[in-house]
Image (tube, helix red, strand yellow):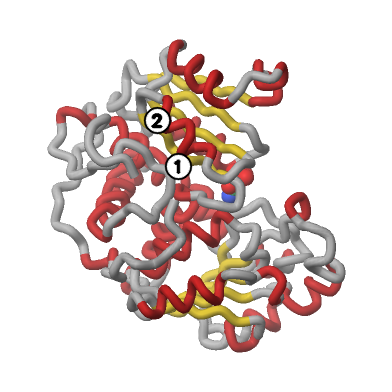
């Protein structure tokens, strides 16, 4: 787990020239230039890796447009989805993605498993492997839990969100959606704002890596109590050539923005005293139509979900013409198909 931004800011839009896999067939039969056994975060992904994920997602989108949106690529593989925290989008889209690839899918909700009797994460991971798991999708409330799982699991671990730390598949589907919807298909020089509860957000932490790697001019905005520590990160990012700013001024952040991503106020993680009240937060930082008018005409409105409408985002903005929130959800299936495919193709090499 790295928190620096020492890597160079090479633009992911540049393209690597690596061949796009034929996703109709098993990945191990393809010359796929993917070397990561696990997907634990996006900080270890190069510009070429990001480009390969984007282009493999394009191929999966083509599969999803077919009358029968299914390929046999992962036939005979078992994908186990082990979630210790609530989820709708990530859990369901991983399940749909795995089924579209013809994998066998096992879904485990920790609350109804032997975890409720005190079984450890390590014992649970060993147990699901003994039951045939080859690709393990893990969500956990504790930051770093997928790294521990990866130490004992013989297959590939995909992080479905861990604590405040990382949500790599969300960041990759956000990147894909921006590239798809921004004119010209590039983030280079585009002003992207992440607005809200940055402190508790694994989505923000992973997006910082991918968006700055793609050349975006990234702005984090929220109350000072929800930005703690990010000024130092932005300073290191700027020193490494990344465009990364932190501000408490919503007007400064939103002015001329190309993309505005609102983040959920995470009431379940909110220590007492970080916000005077949700009402005050909504009044000062909520994404309303009036505030959105500061951004570029047609600026994209995003939200990783789940939303607190009327708090961090007004209902009419969330459902408005500029919103691509449902596109994010839909693209989540294709991006997760791409990642399952790429990871299934290699169980050797570098561990990300
Ligand atoms: N964005 C996201 O992770 O949503 P879920 O919690 O519904 O999976």
Of the numbered discs 1 and 2, the one sitting upstream in the chain is: 2
Residue at point 44%, 11% (across, down): 130
Instruction: Reply above or below: 129 against 227.
Output: above
Instruction: Evaluate if marks 1 and 2 touch, with contact meaning CB atoms under 8 Å apart.
Output: yes
Could you tell me which residue is drawn at 68 percent across and 59 percent down? 264
The answer to whether residue 43 is visible is yes
Location of the C terminus (image quadrant): top left
Q: Position of residue 287 (x, y in %)?
A: 68, 73
Question: Picture coordinates of residue 76 (x, y %)?
Answer: 33, 16
Numbered tag placed on residue 100 in the rendering:
2
- Closer to the camera, 292 or 77? 77
The residue lying toward the viewer, choosing from 148 and 320, is: 148
Q: Residue at position x 23%, y 43% from top?
A: 34
Query: Is 313 positioned to the left or the right of 337 in the image?
Result: right
| Residue 328, image x, y percentages | 51, 54
* Residue 333, numbered circle: 1
Badge 1, how many Cα within 10 Å: few under 14, some, many 20+?
many
Q: Residue at x 23, y 42 (%)?
A: 35
- Disc 1 to disc 2, how far (Cα)? 9 Å
Residue 333: quarter of image: top left
- Few, some or many residues within 10 Å of mark 2 (<14, 14–19, 20+): many
């Amino acid at each position: 787990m790295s928190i620096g931004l020492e890597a160079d800011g090479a633009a992911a839009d540049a393209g690597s020239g690596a061949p796009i896999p034929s996703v109709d067939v098993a990945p191990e039969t393809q010359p796929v230039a993917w070397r990561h056994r696990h997907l634990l975060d996006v900080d270890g992904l190069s510009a070429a890796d990001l480009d390969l994920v984007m282009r493999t997602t394009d191929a999966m989108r083509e599969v999803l447009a077919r009358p029968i949106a299914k390929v046999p690529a992962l036939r005979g593989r078992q994908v186990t989805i082990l979630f210790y925290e609530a989820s709708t989008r990530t859990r369901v889209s991983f399940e749909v993605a795995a089924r579209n690839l013809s994998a066998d899918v096992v879904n485990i909700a920790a609350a109804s498993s032997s975890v409720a009797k005190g079984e450890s994460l390590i014992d649970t991971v060993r147990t699901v492997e003994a039951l045939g798991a080859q690709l393990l999708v893990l969500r956990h409330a504790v930051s770093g839990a997928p790294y521990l799982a990866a130490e004992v699991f013989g297959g590939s671990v995909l992080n479905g969100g861990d604590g405040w730390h990382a949500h790599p598949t969300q960041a990759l589907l956000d990147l894909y959606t921006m590239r798809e919807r921004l004119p010209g298909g590039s983030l280079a020089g585009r002003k992207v704002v992440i607005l809200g509860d940055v402190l508790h957000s694994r989505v923000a932490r992973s997006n910082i890596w991918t968006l700055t790697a793609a050349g975006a001019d990234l702005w984090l905005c929220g109350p000072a109590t929800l930005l703690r520590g990010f000024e130092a990160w932005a300073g290191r990012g700027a020193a490494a050539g990344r465009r990364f700013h932190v501000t408490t001024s919503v007007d400064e952040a939103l002015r001329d923005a190309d993309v505005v991503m609102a983040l959920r106020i995470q009431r379940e993680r909110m220590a007492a005293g970080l916000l005077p009240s949700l009402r005050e937060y909504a009044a000062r930082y909520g994404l309303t139509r009036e505030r959105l008018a500061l951004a570029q005409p047609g600026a994209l409105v995003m939200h990783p979900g789940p939303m607190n409408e009327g708090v961090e985002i007004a209902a009419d903005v969330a459902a408005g013409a500029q919103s691509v929130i449902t596109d994010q959800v839909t693209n989540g299936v294709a991006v997760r198909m791409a990642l399952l495919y790429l990871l299934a193709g290699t169980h050797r090499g570098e561990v990300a």
